């Protein structure tokens, strides 16, 4: 079993839809959880950062962590064509490097 | 504010040639530094990371090496490139407990 599993998609939604992106993981020591957005031929940029379990909201984005199920989610409300990108989940146990999912490619169609 | 510079943006190199990619960070001290490679369909693969000058941890044994000659400088090198070294190379920095900030990447094609 891989440490971090993420459906690569592609995922195509109409503009204005709610998008749900997910990752599962196997290492119970993970406690820092992040979501990165990567546009084509660019470096990833940090979108959301969550410590331990719970929800975090930032504008149209909500990150959820369920440590009991080893499952994290990113929700995008009122999706826009500019949200079209690859979304990568990442997690760490603390003093260890981030482990990334393979990324989910999202297309928001106008 | 902190910035990260990575160059060159694109590189085409013949098999067997040497490689040197440089990454520098400004506006912070003693950052953790990372080299990742991203190949199509394979996600981000950690190659090397460094928590201080001269301290390099290698995650994947291969013909690449890394060095940190100064606090905010991280260099990725190879003596002889292989076709399999083609990919998108990303440098990143972070302070402990914080998210990573990535550079703009170098797209390397080995021909």
Image: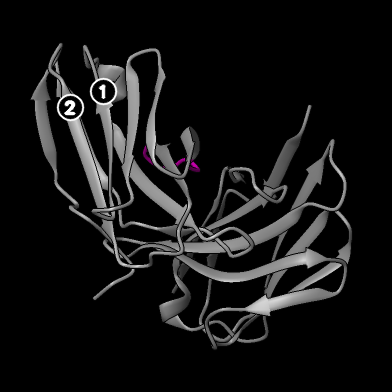
Image quadrant in which the N terminus of chain A is located: bottom left
Task: Answer with the quarter of the image where residue B65 lies.
Answer: bottom right
| Residue extending furthest toward the front | A68
Tell me if residue A84 can be seen.
no
Q: Nearer the viewer, residue B91 or A59?
A: A59
Mark 2 highlights which residue? Answer: A19
Q: Which of marks 2 and 1 is nearer the N terminus?
A: 2
Is residue A65 part of the magenta span, yes or no? no
Is residue A43 part of the magenta span, yes or no? yes
SS majority, magenta: loop
Return the x and y of residue B69 as percentages of the image width and height.
89, 67
Asked if disc 2 and disc 1 are in contact, CB closer than 8 Å, the reply is: yes
Return the x and y of residue B22 as percentages of the image width and height.
73, 58
- At horizontal 50% and vertical 57% (from top left) the residue drawn is A92
Mark 1 highlights which residue? Answer: A76
Q: Nearer the viewer, residue A4 or B86?
A: A4
Q: Under tag 2, what secondary structure? A: strand
* Image-based side of A10 in relation to A47, left or right: left
Which range of residues does the magenta coloring cover? A39-44
Q: Under tag 1, what secondary structure? A: strand
Question: Which label sits on residue A7?
Answer: none
Image quadrant in which the C terminus of chain A is located: top left
């Amino acid at each position: 079993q891989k440490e971090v599993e993420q459906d690569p998609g592609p995922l195509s939604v109409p503009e204005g839809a709610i998008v749900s992106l997910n990752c599962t993981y196997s290492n119970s020591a993970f406690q820092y959880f992040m979501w990165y957005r990567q546009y084509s031929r660019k470096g990833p940029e940090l979108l959301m950062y969550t410590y331990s379990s719970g929800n975090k909201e930032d504008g149209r984005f909500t990150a959820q962590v369920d440590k009991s199920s080893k499952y994290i989610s990113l929700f995008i409300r009122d999706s826009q064509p500019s949200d079209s990108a690859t979304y990568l989940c990442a997690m760490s146990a603390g003093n260890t490097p981030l482990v990334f999912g393979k990324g989910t490619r999202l297309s928001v169609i106008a | 504010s902190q910035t990260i510079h990575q160059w060159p943006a694109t590189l085409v190199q013949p098999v067997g040639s040497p490689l040197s990619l440089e990454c520098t960070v400004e506006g912070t001290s003693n950052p953790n530094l990372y080299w990742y490679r991203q190949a199509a369909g394979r996600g981000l693969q950690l190659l090397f990371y460094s928590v201080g000058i001269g301290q390099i941890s290698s995650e994947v044994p291969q013909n690449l090496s890394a060095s940190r000659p100064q606090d905010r400088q991280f260099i990725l090198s190879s003596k002889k490139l292989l076709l399999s070294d083609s990919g998108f190379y990303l440098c990143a920095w972070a302070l402990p407990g914080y998210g990573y900030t990535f550079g703009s990447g170098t797209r390397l094609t080995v021909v």
